[in-house]
Image: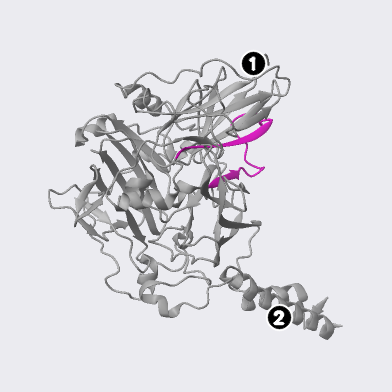
Amino acid sequence: MALFGVSLFTLFSLLLVALFPSLCFTADPSIFYDLRLSYITASPLGVPQQVIAVNGKFPGPLINSTTNDNVNVNVHNDLDENLLMTWSGIQMRRDSWQDGVLGTNCPILPKRNWTYQFQMKDQIGSFFYFPSLNFQRASGGFGPIIINNRVIIAIPFAQPDGDITITIGDWYTQNHTALRSALDAGKGLAMPDGVLINGKGPYRYNNTLVPDGIEYETIQVDPGKTYRVRVHNVGISTSLNFRIQNHFLLLAETEGYYTTQQNFTSLDIHVGQSYSFLVTMDQNASSDYYIVASARFVNESLWQRVTGVAVLRYSNSKGPATGPLPDPPNDFYDKSWSMNQALSIRQNVSASGARPNPQGSFHYGQINVTQTYVIKTVPPEIINGTLRTTLNGISFVNPDTPIRLADKYNVTGAYKLDFPDQPLNRTPRVDRSVINATYKGFIEIIFQNNDTVMQSFHVDGYSFFVAGMGTDEWTVDSRSRYNKWDSISRSTTQVFPGGWTAVLISLDNAGVWNIRTENLDRWYLGQETYMKIINPQENGATEMDKPENVLYCGALQYLAKDQNNSAGSVLRGNSKLLFTLLVAFFALINISS
């Protein structure tokens, strides 16, 4: 059917372009989630306490997606304080507006909601989400994310018989507000009260260490089957050693990149890190088996209670798990075992990730470094009368007006582009210093940990190549030890106390991206900054504009409309456009007939 020689389909397409510019029509599917964060009372370690649930669950529900999916997450804040959700390891291509940290987003006010809209662009793998403000992750609010391969991209192993998600993390029986108050008062965090596995306390493997009546996690499996087991350390500050009694952990992927496959009897998983293993149920079923996550790099005789224990149960199991737990690594006075284990994790250069080309086709070792930053941490110190942490002597305070929003509206003085590229011998200060990075540059960052604790560092918006690690002070000669061929690419890396970790990043994702420690106490006290990466020839193709439902705060508070139920504002507005389109379309049909 045609009208004046033009098909109705063509006319309808023109109407779409004219009337519906705010929607992105692509072949990529859209998925929708509602996440409602609220307080509930739970007793994961046998003591009733306030925790943050997501949709009434602790931990929260899985966000299950596929490469290139357009994701819409409507976050409802039923807490009594501001909220932002961040998506650990999700790269948010060209769209730092959705990152969910204070430098890029105004907070969701209590009893309000907001919709995050982003694409799982060219990504696969295992990740998690969590609340980024006010130490809230210490009370929960976290949950897993899976990005599956598209069916046209083969995975580099046989399809597993099932998928198992495990969250591990240290835990306190005090909630996040009490822990936050202790830090505000200049106190450090005490030893955690335990380790949770999937939000539950330890199986009673020891009648002295574990009180009766604690609910523990049981994972049901079938004999002979192979499962993909995804493990996330969502904790506060404790590195954990993960192991399953009598079972090998065949490492397959970490934070979006396939690894060379190698068997581990146990693996150190540091705060903020994610791994997936292939685990074959090849043991007899004379009893259940222990799943263990125990504290690392501490005095284990004092920290015995900081051990999470769950149960692996075969469907034909003949009895409960008994006896001692499988041994942890015995290297308290020697960090080389753990570092060598970390350096053995290599990228599978021949496997395809999100795209059909091999992961190793990006020859990062042949690219010239355009900028180097040595970022040094030291133990917490008193600045202006309060306990603070620093990067290169600067303790970061988030701007009242998020950085890109300040740029869009010419808000002056919101932040400074003067973060130093080297540690400076000067009095530490509180500031809003941001890295002025170059779009399309290739940056080298050395995290030098002169603190006394193991730390994890994370970069939003990117994966980076973990080029090298050492237990000493980094120098230019340390580059001779870099792996420039098959270093693993990931978004969170460990940095050993007294040592360094060097990462290489290709700056192809325009926007403003957070760099932080994942140790919540260090992060809360100021150990973060941002990279501002702007294309000087920006034409709309390299960075998305602010979303239609953008929140305003700080110097732009006067622009804020009623944010109540703002989550649906974009969809409601588009629904009106859709109605207009349909009316116009049917009018065309009537005219043509």
- Alpha-carbon neighbours of circle 1 within 10 Å: few (<14), some, or many (≥20)? some
Picture quarter containing residue 43? Answer: top right
Q: Which residue occupies the foreground of this view, 58 or 159?
A: 58
Q: Which residue occupies the foreground of this view, 161 or 455?
A: 455
Q: What's the amino acid at mark 1?
A: Gln
Residue drawn at point x = 43 percent, y = 64 percent: 105
Question: On screen, 172 above or below 83?
Answer: above
Magenta residues, as a range?
142-171
Estimate the x, y position of residue 187 in percent, counting from the top left: 29, 46
Q: Does any portion of residue 285 appear in the rendered image? A: yes
Task: Identify the element where label 1 is drawn.
Answer: loop
- Distance between the alpha carbons at the discs numbered 2 and 1: 63 Å
- Alpha-carbon neighbours of circle 2 within 10 Å: few (<14), some, or many (≥20)? some
- Quarter of the rendering occupied by the N terminus: bottom right
Q: Which residue is mark 2?
A: 580
Picture quarter containing residue 227? Answer: top right
Horizontal arrangement in the rendering, residue 188 relative to residue 280 (left or right): left
Task: Identify the element where label 2 is drawn.
Answer: helix
Residue drawn at point x = 55 percent, y = 19 percent: 245
Estimate the x, y position of residue 416 in percent, counting from the top left: 25, 64
Q: Which residue is mark 1?
A: 283
Residue drawn at point x = 47 percent, y = 69 percent: 546
Mark seen at residue 65: none
Horizontal arrangement in the rendering, residue 8 relative to residue 92 (left or right): right
Estimate the x, y position of residue 451 in percent, counting from the top left: 25, 38
